[in-house]
Image (cartoon, rainbow, N blue to C red):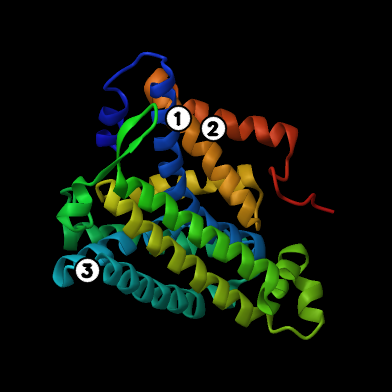
């Protein structure tokens, strides 16, 4: 994210245009965090397990999107290719490695940690340690729009924000307005009671795990368009997505959106005005929220 820091620190005065610029950059960063965390919050909220491979899904999705977009010259095909490949991988991981140990949180965490470590080494061997970015059409790369008080701002960043908003609204409607969404909400509240009503909870778990993997892949392509893809980013995005889920409340899509906005803004403002304490302030946000609302901003109290 060094290019983001350079972009933000061109002027360090606390002027209105500076604050608006940092805010807008914080929102675009929040868009990527939301796409990663939305899948994780569904998996965490419904299955009650932490998948340590979620960051790996993000980075691998970015690399797959990079290869497809580079070979086809089409960014949208890169998104579709990454979503299909990582969704299928998520299904295999769930069916082969996770399903049998669904009720053993520690074992699932260790299994997915192993998957993450193996995936990280394989990606390093295949793609190397150099930074890569998902290609976009040259005209879009340099396109900008004039925003009052800010000036020229990259269209690409605004499109990323728009993509996150569209996906967020679609997810919220899917969870709140569909029959399957009602099953998911019931499972988040009480998975055992949901299973007792005759719902095949294991099938629901598999679908949610695949959906979470697909969202991570989309986030990887979107994030890889704005920021370089590098080995080790899987751990970084897993960590930030966990913070977003904890702040927003597990199992809540609106909570993930609120958490992502807060984390993105705190991260960007601290990078400009207190870069030494950027990570500390981000975690301080989580501590404050947990002290006030242990279940997260939009999470439901545990009975």
In x, y percent, where is residue 286? 60, 35
Q: Secondary structure at mark 2?
A: helix
Foreground of the two, 294 or 39 = 39
Few, some or many residues within 10 Å of mark 1 (<14, 14–19, 20+):
some
The reply to whether callout 3 and callout 1 are in contact (CB within 8 Å) is no
The earlier-in-sequence mark between 2 and 3 is 3
| Image vertical order of residue 289 relative to residue 181, above or below | above
In x, y percent, where is residue 206? 56, 77
Residue 44: mark in rendering = none
* Residue in the image at 16% along x and 65% along y: 70
Q: Quadrant of residue 145?
A: top left
In x, y percent, where is residue 132? 19, 52
Residue position marked by numbered label 3 in the rendering: 74
The reply to whether callout 2 and callout 1 are in contact (CB within 8 Å) is yes
* Residue in the image at 79% along x and 49% along y: 301
Few, some or many residues within 10 Å of mark 2 (<14, 14–19, 20+):
some
The C terminus - image quarter: bottom right
The reply to whether callout 2 and callout 3 are in contact (CB within 8 Å) is no
| Image vertical order of residue 198 relative to residue 93, above or below | below
Q: Alpha-carbon distance for marks 2 and 1?
A: 6 Å
Residue position marked by numbered label 2 in the rendering: 283
* Residue in the image at 22% along x and 68% along y: 74
Q: Secondary structure at mark 3?
A: loop
Residue 274 visible (yes or no) = no
Q: Alpha-carbon distance for marks 2 and 3?
A: 38 Å
């Amino acid at each position: 994210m060094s290019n983001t820091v350079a972009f933000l620190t061109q002027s360090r005065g606390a002027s209105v245009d500076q604050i608006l610029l940092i805010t807008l950059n914080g929102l675009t960063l929040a868009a990527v965090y939301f796409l990663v965390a939305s899948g994780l919050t569904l998996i965490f909220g419904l299955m009650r397990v932490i998948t340590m491979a979620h960051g790996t899904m993000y980075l691998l999705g970015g690399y797959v999107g990079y290869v497809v977009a580079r070979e086809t010259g089409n960014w949208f095909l890169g998104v579709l290719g990454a979503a299909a490949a990582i969704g299928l991988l998520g299904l295999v991981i769930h069916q082969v490695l996770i399903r049998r140990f669904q009720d053993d949180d520690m074992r699932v965490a260790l299994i997915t940690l192993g998957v993450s470590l193996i995936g990280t080494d394989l990606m390093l061997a295949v793609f190397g340690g150099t930074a890569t970015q998902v290609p976009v059409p040259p005209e879009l790369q340099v396109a900008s729009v004039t925003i009052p008080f800010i000036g020229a701002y990259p269209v690409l960043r605004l499109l990323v924000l728009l993509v996150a908003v569209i996906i967020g609204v679609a997810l919220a409607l899917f969870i709140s307005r569909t029959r399957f969404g009602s099953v998911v909400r019931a499972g988040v509240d009480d998975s055992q009671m949901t299973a007792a009503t005759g719902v095949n909870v294991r099938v629901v778990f598999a679908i949610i795990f695949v959906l979470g993997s697909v969202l991570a892949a989309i986030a990887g392509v979107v994030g890889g368009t704005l920021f370089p893809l590098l080995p080790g980013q899987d751990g970084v995005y897993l960590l930030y997505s966990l913070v977003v889920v904890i702040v927003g409340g597990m199992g809540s899509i609106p909570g993930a959106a609120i958490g992502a906005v807060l984390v993105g803004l705190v991260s960007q403002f601290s990078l400009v005005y207190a870069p030494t304490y950027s990570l500390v302030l981000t975690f301080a946000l989580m501590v404050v929220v947990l002290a006030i609302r242990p279940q997260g901003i939009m999470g439901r109290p545990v009975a």
